[in-house]
Amino acid sequence: MAAKLTRRERERQRHRREILAAAQDLFARKGFDKTAMAEIAERAEFAVGTLYKFFEDKEALYRALILDTMRDFERELSAALKTPGTESEKLDRYIEAKAALFVRHIPTARLYFAQTAGTAFLPMAGLDRDARAIYEKVLGSLETVFRNGIRKKLLANMDPKMLVLGLEGLTNAFLDELIERPDDFSAETMAGMTKTIFFERIRLKAK
Amino acid sequence: MAAKLTRRERERQRHRREILAAAQDLFARKGFDKTAMAEIAERAEFAVGTLYKFFEDKEALYRALILDTMRDFERELSAALKTPGTESEKLDRYIEAKAALFVRHIPTARLYFAQTAGTAFLPMAGLDRDARAIYEKVLGSLETVFRNGIRKKLLANMDPKMLVLGLEGLTNAFLDELIERPDDFSAETMAGMTKTIFFERIRLKAK
DNA sequence: ACAGCATGTGAACCATTATTCATAATATAT
DNA sequence: ATATATTATGAATAATGGTTCACATGCTGT
Protein backbone atom coordinates (compact mmCIF):
# COMPACT_ATOMS: atom_id res chain seq x y z
CA MET A 1 0.00 0.00 0.00
CA ALA A 2 2.52 2.55 1.19
CA ALA A 3 4.61 2.71 -1.97
CA LYS A 4 8.31 3.03 -1.23
CA LEU A 5 9.15 6.60 -2.10
CA THR A 6 12.56 7.93 -2.96
CA ARG A 7 14.21 10.31 -0.55
CA ARG A 8 13.61 13.05 -3.13
CA GLU A 9 9.94 12.35 -3.26
CA ARG A 10 9.62 12.21 0.52
CA GLU A 11 11.42 15.53 0.88
CA ARG A 12 9.18 17.02 -1.73
CA GLN A 13 6.07 15.93 0.16
CA ARG A 14 7.46 17.32 3.37
CA HIS A 15 8.11 20.66 1.73
CA ARG A 16 4.62 20.66 0.35
CA ARG A 17 3.23 20.10 3.83
CA GLU A 18 5.42 22.86 5.25
CA ILE A 19 4.03 25.28 2.72
CA LEU A 20 0.48 24.25 3.54
CA ALA A 21 1.14 24.63 7.25
CA ALA A 22 2.42 28.16 6.77
CA ALA A 23 -0.53 29.01 4.57
CA GLN A 24 -2.97 27.48 7.01
CA ASP A 25 -2.16 29.84 9.80
CA LEU A 26 -2.11 32.94 7.60
CA PHE A 27 -5.32 32.16 5.74
CA ALA A 28 -7.06 31.31 8.98
CA ARG A 29 -6.13 34.61 10.56
CA LYS A 30 -6.35 37.02 7.66
CA GLY A 31 -8.40 35.38 4.97
CA PHE A 32 -7.59 34.68 1.35
CA ASP A 33 -7.19 38.13 -0.13
CA LYS A 34 -5.21 39.71 2.66
CA THR A 35 -2.64 36.92 2.63
CA ALA A 36 0.19 37.46 0.13
CA MET A 37 2.09 34.66 -1.55
CA ALA A 38 5.33 36.36 -0.51
CA GLU A 39 4.18 36.16 3.08
CA ILE A 40 3.44 32.45 2.86
CA ALA A 41 6.80 31.90 1.20
CA GLU A 42 8.64 33.82 3.88
CA ARG A 43 6.98 31.96 6.71
CA ALA A 44 7.61 28.61 5.03
CA GLU A 45 11.21 29.66 4.39
CA PHE A 46 11.02 29.19 0.65
CA ALA A 47 11.20 31.61 -2.26
CA VAL A 48 7.94 32.62 -3.89
CA GLY A 49 8.88 30.78 -7.05
CA THR A 50 9.04 27.55 -5.12
CA LEU A 51 5.40 27.75 -4.14
CA TYR A 52 4.57 27.68 -7.83
CA LYS A 53 6.47 24.44 -8.22
CA PHE A 54 3.93 22.87 -5.90
CA PHE A 55 0.74 24.70 -6.74
CA GLU A 56 -0.58 26.03 -10.02
CA ASP A 57 -1.52 29.34 -8.45
CA LYS A 58 -2.67 30.94 -5.22
CA GLU A 59 -6.16 29.62 -5.62
CA ALA A 60 -4.96 26.05 -6.11
CA LEU A 61 -2.94 26.36 -2.93
CA TYR A 62 -5.98 27.57 -1.04
CA ARG A 63 -8.14 24.90 -2.57
CA ALA A 64 -5.72 22.14 -1.59
CA LEU A 65 -5.60 23.48 1.94
CA ILE A 66 -9.35 23.71 2.34
CA LEU A 67 -10.04 20.30 0.90
CA ASP A 68 -7.35 18.68 3.05
CA THR A 69 -8.80 20.35 6.11
CA MET A 70 -12.33 19.35 5.26
CA ARG A 71 -11.36 15.75 4.61
CA ASP A 72 -9.49 15.46 7.91
CA PHE A 73 -12.43 16.79 9.86
CA GLU A 74 -14.94 14.75 7.92
CA ARG A 75 -13.03 11.58 8.62
CA GLU A 76 -12.80 12.21 12.34
CA LEU A 77 -16.41 13.29 12.74
CA SER A 78 -17.81 10.44 10.69
CA ALA A 79 -15.74 8.04 12.76
CA ALA A 80 -17.33 9.32 15.96
CA LEU A 81 -20.74 8.53 14.50
CA LYS A 82 -19.76 5.00 13.60
CA THR A 83 -18.70 3.76 17.01
CA PRO A 84 -21.11 1.16 18.43
CA GLY A 85 -23.92 2.12 20.80
CA THR A 86 -27.39 3.61 20.74
CA GLU A 87 -28.13 6.57 18.54
CA SER A 88 -28.22 8.79 21.62
CA GLU A 89 -24.74 7.67 22.52
CA LYS A 90 -23.49 8.20 19.00
CA LEU A 91 -24.73 11.77 19.07
CA ASP A 92 -23.14 12.39 22.43
CA ARG A 93 -19.89 11.10 21.07
CA TYR A 94 -20.21 13.26 18.00
CA ILE A 95 -20.65 16.37 20.10
CA GLU A 96 -17.67 15.52 22.27
CA ALA A 97 -15.47 14.60 19.33
CA LYS A 98 -16.33 17.79 17.51
CA ALA A 99 -15.55 19.93 20.54
CA ALA A 100 -12.25 18.18 21.19
CA LEU A 101 -11.26 18.33 17.54
CA PHE A 102 -11.95 22.04 17.19
CA VAL A 103 -10.17 22.97 20.37
CA ARG A 104 -7.15 20.96 19.40
CA HIS A 105 -6.91 22.51 15.96
CA ILE A 106 -8.06 26.08 16.18
CA PRO A 107 -6.65 27.49 12.93
CA THR A 108 -7.91 24.46 11.09
CA ALA A 109 -11.30 24.86 12.73
CA ARG A 110 -11.50 28.44 11.56
CA LEU A 111 -10.96 27.38 8.00
CA TYR A 112 -13.51 24.62 8.39
CA PHE A 113 -15.98 27.17 9.71
CA ALA A 114 -15.25 29.67 7.02
CA GLN A 115 -16.12 27.01 4.52
CA THR A 116 -19.06 25.24 6.13
CA ALA A 117 -20.73 28.04 8.06
CA GLY A 118 -23.06 29.39 5.45
CA THR A 119 -22.15 32.77 4.22
CA ALA A 120 -18.56 32.27 3.22
CA PHE A 121 -17.82 34.85 0.56
CA LEU A 122 -16.02 32.39 -1.61
CA PRO A 123 -17.61 31.88 -4.97
CA MET A 124 -14.23 30.53 -5.95
CA ALA A 125 -15.64 28.55 -8.81
CA GLY A 126 -15.90 24.94 -7.82
CA LEU A 127 -14.31 25.05 -4.39
CA ASP A 128 -17.59 25.78 -2.77
CA ARG A 129 -19.09 22.79 -4.50
CA ASP A 130 -16.28 20.39 -3.60
CA ALA A 131 -16.05 21.55 -0.01
CA ARG A 132 -19.79 21.32 0.33
CA ALA A 133 -19.71 17.77 -0.99
CA ILE A 134 -17.34 16.74 1.77
CA TYR A 135 -19.38 18.51 4.42
CA GLU A 136 -22.49 16.79 3.12
CA LYS A 137 -20.91 13.48 4.07
CA VAL A 138 -20.90 14.54 7.70
CA LEU A 139 -24.43 15.83 7.42
CA GLY A 140 -25.48 12.60 5.75
CA SER A 141 -24.01 10.41 8.48
CA LEU A 142 -25.65 12.58 11.07
CA GLU A 143 -28.97 12.35 9.31
CA THR A 144 -28.76 8.58 9.22
CA VAL A 145 -28.17 8.46 12.95
CA PHE A 146 -31.18 10.65 13.58
CA ARG A 147 -33.27 8.58 11.21
CA ASN A 148 -32.35 5.36 12.99
CA GLY A 149 -32.90 6.89 16.40
CA ILE A 150 -36.34 7.97 15.35
CA ARG A 151 -37.19 4.57 13.88
CA LYS A 152 -36.16 2.91 17.13
CA LYS A 153 -38.28 5.43 19.02
CA LEU A 154 -35.26 6.74 20.85
CA LEU A 155 -35.63 10.22 19.43
CA ALA A 156 -38.60 12.47 18.84
CA ASN A 157 -40.20 12.07 15.46
CA MET A 158 -39.06 15.21 13.68
CA ASP A 159 -37.66 15.85 10.22
CA PRO A 160 -34.09 14.49 10.45
CA LYS A 161 -32.78 17.20 8.13
CA MET A 162 -34.02 19.81 10.55
CA LEU A 163 -32.46 18.01 13.47
CA VAL A 164 -29.15 17.94 11.64
CA LEU A 165 -29.39 21.62 10.92
CA GLY A 166 -30.27 22.35 14.51
CA LEU A 167 -27.51 20.29 16.03
CA GLU A 168 -24.94 21.79 13.69
CA GLY A 169 -26.13 25.30 14.44
CA LEU A 170 -25.91 24.72 18.14
CA THR A 171 -22.49 23.08 18.18
CA ASN A 172 -21.07 25.65 15.79
CA ALA A 173 -22.31 28.56 17.87
CA PHE A 174 -20.75 27.18 21.01
CA LEU A 175 -17.55 26.15 19.32
CA ASP A 176 -17.15 29.46 17.60
CA GLU A 177 -17.43 31.19 20.94
CA LEU A 178 -14.97 28.72 22.38
CA ILE A 179 -12.46 29.37 19.63
CA GLU A 180 -12.76 33.15 19.53
CA ARG A 181 -13.02 33.72 23.27
CA PRO A 182 -11.38 30.67 24.76
CA ASP A 183 -11.41 32.05 28.29
CA ASP A 184 -15.18 32.14 28.48
CA PHE A 185 -15.65 28.44 29.02
CA SER A 186 -14.25 24.98 28.37
CA ALA A 187 -14.86 22.38 25.69
CA GLU A 188 -16.56 20.17 28.27
CA THR A 189 -18.96 22.90 29.37
CA MET A 190 -19.79 23.53 25.74
CA ALA A 191 -20.46 19.88 25.00
CA GLY A 192 -22.60 19.65 28.10
CA MET A 193 -24.65 22.70 27.19
CA THR A 194 -25.26 21.43 23.70
CA LYS A 195 -26.55 18.15 25.01
CA THR A 196 -28.74 19.84 27.57
CA ILE A 197 -30.30 22.31 25.21
CA PHE A 198 -30.64 19.95 22.35
CA PHE A 199 -31.79 16.94 24.29
CA GLU A 200 -33.65 18.20 27.26
CA ARG A 201 -36.47 20.57 27.62
CA ILE A 202 -35.75 24.16 28.41
CA ARG A 203 -39.11 25.64 28.93
CA LEU A 204 -40.62 24.46 32.18
CA LYS A 205 -44.23 25.36 31.56
CA ALA A 206 -46.19 25.28 28.33
CA LYS A 207 -46.91 28.79 27.19
CA MET B 1 -36.64 67.45 15.08
CA ALA B 2 -36.67 66.80 11.36
CA ALA B 3 -34.64 69.81 10.28
CA LYS B 4 -35.87 71.30 7.03
CA LEU B 5 -33.26 70.36 4.50
CA THR B 6 -32.55 72.17 1.28
CA ARG B 7 -33.33 70.42 -2.00
CA ARG B 8 -29.58 70.13 -2.53
CA GLU B 9 -29.06 68.43 0.76
CA ARG B 10 -31.96 66.04 0.20
CA GLU B 11 -30.63 65.10 -3.22
CA ARG B 12 -27.25 64.51 -1.74
CA GLN B 13 -28.64 62.16 0.88
CA ARG B 14 -30.60 60.32 -1.76
CA HIS B 15 -27.47 59.82 -3.84
CA ARG B 16 -25.65 58.58 -0.81
CA ARG B 17 -28.35 56.02 -0.21
CA GLU B 18 -28.26 54.96 -3.84
CA ILE B 19 -24.56 54.31 -3.59
CA LEU B 20 -25.03 52.31 -0.42
CA ALA B 21 -27.81 50.29 -2.02
CA ALA B 22 -25.62 49.39 -4.98
CA ALA B 23 -22.76 48.49 -2.67
CA GLN B 24 -25.03 46.44 -0.44
CA ASP B 25 -25.94 44.00 -3.11
CA LEU B 26 -22.42 43.62 -4.45
CA PHE B 27 -20.74 43.25 -1.07
CA ALA B 28 -23.39 40.77 0.02
CA ARG B 29 -22.83 38.58 -3.01
CA LYS B 30 -19.10 38.84 -3.54
CA GLY B 31 -17.56 40.12 -0.35
CA PHE B 32 -15.36 43.13 0.27
CA ASP B 33 -12.24 42.34 -1.71
CA LYS B 34 -13.88 40.99 -4.82
CA THR B 35 -16.10 44.03 -5.18
CA ALA B 36 -14.45 46.88 -7.10
CA MET B 37 -15.22 50.54 -6.55
CA ALA B 38 -15.71 50.91 -10.30
CA GLU B 39 -18.35 48.22 -10.13
CA ILE B 40 -20.25 49.94 -7.36
CA ALA B 41 -20.01 53.20 -9.26
CA GLU B 42 -21.34 51.64 -12.42
CA ARG B 43 -24.27 50.01 -10.71
CA ALA B 44 -25.13 53.20 -8.86
CA GLU B 45 -24.78 55.14 -12.13
CA PHE B 46 -22.15 57.50 -10.84
CA ALA B 47 -18.51 58.03 -11.69
CA VAL B 48 -15.91 56.51 -9.37
CA GLY B 49 -14.79 59.94 -8.31
CA THR B 50 -18.24 60.68 -7.00
CA LEU B 51 -18.08 57.84 -4.51
CA TYR B 52 -15.09 59.57 -2.98
CA LYS B 53 -17.13 62.71 -2.46
CA PHE B 54 -19.30 60.71 -0.12
CA PHE B 55 -16.88 58.31 1.51
CA GLU B 56 -13.27 58.74 2.51
CA ASP B 57 -12.28 55.43 0.94
CA LYS B 58 -13.59 51.96 0.16
CA GLU B 59 -13.29 50.88 3.73
CA ALA B 60 -15.32 53.83 5.00
CA LEU B 61 -18.04 52.98 2.51
CA TYR B 62 -18.12 49.40 3.73
CA ARG B 63 -18.04 50.49 7.32
CA ALA B 64 -21.00 52.84 6.83
CA LEU B 65 -22.95 50.09 5.14
CA ILE B 66 -22.28 47.51 7.81
CA LEU B 67 -23.05 49.81 10.68
CA ASP B 68 -26.28 51.02 9.05
CA THR B 69 -27.32 47.43 8.48
CA MET B 70 -26.47 46.38 11.98
CA ARG B 71 -28.33 49.30 13.51
CA ASP B 72 -31.47 48.60 11.49
CA PHE B 73 -31.53 44.98 12.51
CA GLU B 74 -30.67 45.73 16.10
CA ARG B 75 -33.55 48.18 16.35
CA GLU B 76 -36.08 45.75 14.94
CA LEU B 77 -34.92 42.79 16.98
CA SER B 78 -34.73 44.70 20.23
CA ALA B 79 -38.24 46.01 19.58
CA ALA B 80 -39.57 42.46 19.30
CA LEU B 81 -38.14 41.73 22.71
CA LYS B 82 -39.76 44.76 24.27
CA THR B 83 -43.39 44.04 23.42
CA PRO B 84 -45.48 43.17 26.47
CA GLY B 85 -46.09 39.58 27.51
CA THR B 86 -44.38 36.73 29.32
CA GLU B 87 -40.74 35.98 28.65
CA SER B 88 -41.78 32.91 26.69
CA GLU B 89 -43.91 35.06 24.45
CA LYS B 90 -41.18 37.60 23.99
CA LEU B 91 -38.82 34.90 22.82
CA ASP B 92 -41.40 33.51 20.45
CA ARG B 93 -41.86 36.96 19.03
CA TYR B 94 -38.13 37.41 18.70
CA ILE B 95 -37.79 34.22 16.71
CA GLU B 96 -40.64 35.16 14.42
CA ALA B 97 -39.43 38.71 13.96
CA LYS B 98 -35.94 37.55 13.13
CA ALA B 99 -37.17 35.06 10.56
CA ALA B 100 -39.46 37.59 8.90
CA LEU B 101 -36.79 40.26 8.90
CA PHE B 102 -34.15 38.05 7.33
CA VAL B 103 -36.44 36.71 4.65
CA ARG B 104 -37.58 40.17 3.73
CA HIS B 105 -34.05 41.53 3.44
CA ILE B 106 -31.84 38.78 2.17
CA PRO B 107 -28.79 40.78 1.00
CA THR B 108 -28.91 42.75 4.21
CA ALA B 109 -29.19 39.55 6.19
CA ARG B 110 -26.09 38.18 4.51
CA LEU B 111 -24.10 41.18 5.55
CA TYR B 112 -25.47 40.93 9.06
CA PHE B 113 -24.42 37.30 9.15
CA ALA B 114 -21.01 37.97 7.72
CA GLN B 115 -20.46 40.39 10.54
CA THR B 116 -22.09 38.65 13.48
CA ALA B 117 -21.51 35.00 12.69
CA GLY B 118 -18.16 34.43 14.26
CA THR B 119 -15.39 33.88 11.83
CA ALA B 120 -15.72 36.90 9.60
CA PHE B 121 -12.30 37.52 8.13
CA LEU B 122 -12.48 41.23 8.74
CA PRO B 123 -9.89 42.49 11.11
CA MET B 124 -10.68 45.85 9.53
CA ALA B 125 -9.37 47.85 12.43
CA GLY B 126 -12.25 49.04 14.51
CA LEU B 127 -15.17 47.87 12.43
CA ASP B 128 -15.22 44.56 14.14
CA ARG B 129 -15.37 46.32 17.48
CA ASP B 130 -18.12 48.73 16.50
CA ALA B 131 -20.25 46.10 14.80
CA ARG B 132 -19.80 43.79 17.72
CA ALA B 133 -20.93 46.54 20.08
CA ILE B 134 -24.22 46.87 18.21
CA TYR B 135 -24.73 43.13 18.12
CA GLU B 136 -24.05 42.97 21.83
CA LYS B 137 -27.12 45.14 22.36
CA VAL B 138 -29.29 42.42 20.86
CA LEU B 139 -27.50 39.79 22.89
CA GLY B 140 -27.89 41.90 25.99
CA SER B 141 -31.64 42.33 25.53
CA LEU B 142 -31.98 38.65 24.90
CA GLU B 143 -30.00 37.85 28.02
CA THR B 144 -32.23 40.06 30.11
CA VAL B 145 -35.31 38.27 28.85
CA PHE B 146 -33.80 34.91 29.74
CA ARG B 147 -32.73 36.19 33.11
CA ASN B 148 -36.23 37.44 33.90
CA GLY B 149 -37.84 34.25 32.63
CA ILE B 150 -35.60 32.23 34.88
CA ARG B 151 -36.28 34.43 37.87
CA LYS B 152 -40.02 34.03 37.33
CA LYS B 153 -39.50 30.27 37.04
CA LEU B 154 -40.81 30.29 33.49
CA LEU B 155 -37.56 29.02 32.05
CA ALA B 156 -35.10 26.38 33.14
CA ASN B 157 -32.37 27.64 35.40
CA MET B 158 -29.39 27.70 33.06
CA ASP B 159 -26.65 30.25 32.41
CA PRO B 160 -28.44 32.98 30.42
CA LYS B 161 -25.34 33.66 28.34
CA MET B 162 -25.37 30.07 27.18
CA LEU B 163 -29.04 30.24 26.36
CA VAL B 164 -28.43 33.34 24.28
CA LEU B 165 -25.61 31.63 22.44
CA GLY B 166 -27.75 28.58 21.86
CA LEU B 167 -30.77 30.44 20.60
CA GLU B 168 -28.66 32.53 18.28
CA GLY B 169 -26.88 29.48 16.93
CA LEU B 170 -30.12 27.74 16.24
CA THR B 171 -31.89 30.63 14.57
CA ASN B 172 -28.85 31.50 12.52
CA ALA B 173 -28.44 27.95 11.27
CA PHE B 174 -32.04 27.76 10.14
CA LEU B 175 -32.07 31.24 8.68
CA ASP B 176 -28.86 30.69 6.83
CA GLU B 177 -30.34 27.61 5.23
CA LEU B 178 -33.48 29.56 4.46
CA ILE B 179 -31.53 32.32 2.79
CA GLU B 180 -29.14 30.15 0.81
CA ARG B 181 -31.62 27.47 -0.20
CA PRO B 182 -34.97 29.22 -0.03
CA ASP B 183 -36.87 26.35 -1.61
CA ASP B 184 -36.10 23.94 1.20
CA PHE B 185 -38.62 25.35 3.63
CA SER B 186 -40.48 28.46 4.74
CA ALA B 187 -39.84 31.09 7.38
CA GLU B 188 -42.75 29.74 9.40
CA THR B 189 -41.41 26.19 9.37
CA MET B 190 -38.06 27.50 10.47
CA ALA B 191 -39.52 29.53 13.32
CA GLY B 192 -41.57 26.53 14.39
CA MET B 193 -38.58 24.22 14.39
CA THR B 194 -36.51 26.62 16.41
CA LYS B 195 -39.19 26.83 19.04
CA THR B 196 -39.66 23.10 19.13
CA ILE B 197 -36.00 22.24 19.44
CA PHE B 198 -35.14 25.02 21.77
CA PHE B 199 -38.15 24.79 24.00
CA GLU B 200 -39.27 21.23 23.97
CA ARG B 201 -37.51 18.07 24.64
CA ILE B 202 -36.11 16.08 21.77
CA ARG B 203 -34.82 12.99 23.37
CA LEU B 204 -37.69 10.75 24.46
CA LYS B 205 -35.80 8.47 26.82
CA ALA B 206 -32.92 9.24 29.10
CA LYS B 207 -29.78 7.60 27.86
C1' DA C 1 -28.64 86.69 -16.96
C1' DC C 2 -24.66 85.92 -14.52
C1' DA C 3 -21.31 84.94 -10.79
C1' DG C 4 -20.17 81.66 -7.63
C1' DC C 5 -20.51 77.42 -5.46
C1' DA C 6 -21.69 72.62 -5.03
C1' DT C 7 -21.57 68.46 -7.28
C1' DG C 8 -20.22 65.07 -10.77
C1' DT C 9 -16.65 63.13 -14.12
C1' DG C 10 -13.20 59.68 -15.59
C1' DA C 11 -8.56 59.38 -17.47
C1' DA C 12 -4.20 59.05 -15.36
C1' DC C 13 -1.48 57.67 -11.50
C1' DC C 14 0.44 54.59 -8.30
C1' DA C 15 0.85 50.81 -4.97
C1' DT C 16 0.23 46.22 -4.30
C1' DT C 17 0.87 41.58 -5.43
C1' DA C 18 0.33 37.39 -8.34
C1' DT C 19 3.09 35.14 -11.62
C1' DT C 20 7.11 34.03 -14.63
C1' DC C 21 11.63 32.49 -15.95
C1' DA C 22 16.59 32.64 -16.57
C1' DT C 23 19.86 31.18 -13.36
C1' DA C 24 21.90 28.87 -9.30
C1' DA C 25 22.22 25.21 -6.10
C1' DT C 26 21.86 20.51 -5.06
C1' DA C 27 21.02 15.73 -5.49
C1' DT C 28 21.46 11.34 -8.26
C1' DA C 29 23.42 8.29 -11.44
C1' DT C 30 27.25 6.53 -14.18
C1' DA D 1 34.39 12.96 -10.61
C1' DT D 2 31.47 14.46 -14.07
C1' DA D 3 27.20 14.70 -16.37
C1' DT D 4 22.37 15.03 -15.84
C1' DA D 5 18.13 15.80 -13.74
C1' DT D 6 15.67 17.91 -10.13
C1' DT D 7 14.54 21.56 -7.23
C1' DA D 8 15.06 26.31 -5.37
C1' DT D 9 15.76 31.26 -6.14
C1' DG D 10 14.14 36.11 -6.45
C1' DA D 11 14.46 40.07 -9.54
C1' DA D 12 11.60 41.48 -13.28
C1' DT D 13 7.02 41.64 -15.31
C1' DA D 14 2.20 42.47 -15.72
C1' DA D 15 -2.34 42.98 -14.12
C1' DT D 16 -5.47 44.65 -10.98
C1' DG D 17 -7.88 48.07 -8.76
C1' DG D 18 -7.94 51.97 -5.27
C1' DT D 19 -7.34 56.84 -5.34
C1' DT D 20 -6.57 61.60 -7.12
C1' DC D 21 -7.49 65.88 -9.41
C1' DA D 22 -8.06 69.20 -13.08
C1' DC D 23 -12.03 70.01 -15.37
C1' DA D 24 -17.10 69.97 -16.70
C1' DT D 25 -21.83 70.47 -15.48
C1' DG D 26 -25.58 72.43 -13.41
C1' DC D 27 -27.97 74.79 -9.19
C1' DT D 28 -28.97 78.91 -6.43
C1' DG D 29 -29.38 83.40 -5.24
C1' DT D 30 -28.96 88.22 -6.75
Image (cartoon, coloured by chain):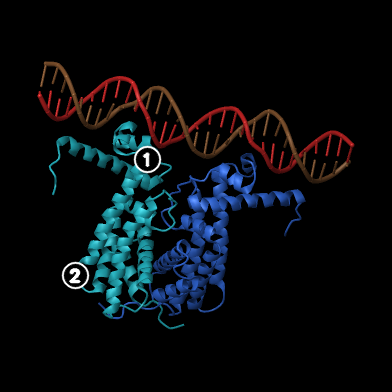
Chain colours: A cyan, B blue, C red, D brown
Q: Which residue is labeled 2 in the image?
A: A84
Q: Residues within 10 Å of mark 1 (few under 14, many from 20)?
A: some
Q: Residue at x 28, y 58 (%)?
A: A74
Q: Which residue is labeled 1 in the image?
A: A58
Judge by depth and name the residue closer to the eye, A140 or A22.
A140
Q: Quadrant of residue A104?
A: bottom left
Q: Residue at x 44, y 58 (%)?
A: B117
Query: Helix, strand, or loop for circle 1?
Result: helix
Q: Residue at x 52, y 74 (%)?
A: B93
A6 in relation to B83, above or below: above
Rendering coords of residue A29 (x, y %):
38, 46
Can see residue B112?
A: yes
Question: Disc 1: which chain?
Answer: A
Q: Residues within 10 Å of mark 2 (few under 14, many from 20)?
A: few
Rendering coords of residue A120 (x, y %):
43, 54
Q: Is residue B12 left or right of residue A163?
A: right
Amino acid type, mark 1: Lys
Q: Is residue A64 left or right of residue D18?
A: left
Amino acid type, mark 2: Pro
Rendering coords of residue A73 (x, y %):
28, 56
Q: Quadrant of residue C27?
A: top left
First in sequence: mark 2 vs mark 1: 1
Question: Disc 2: which chain?
Answer: A
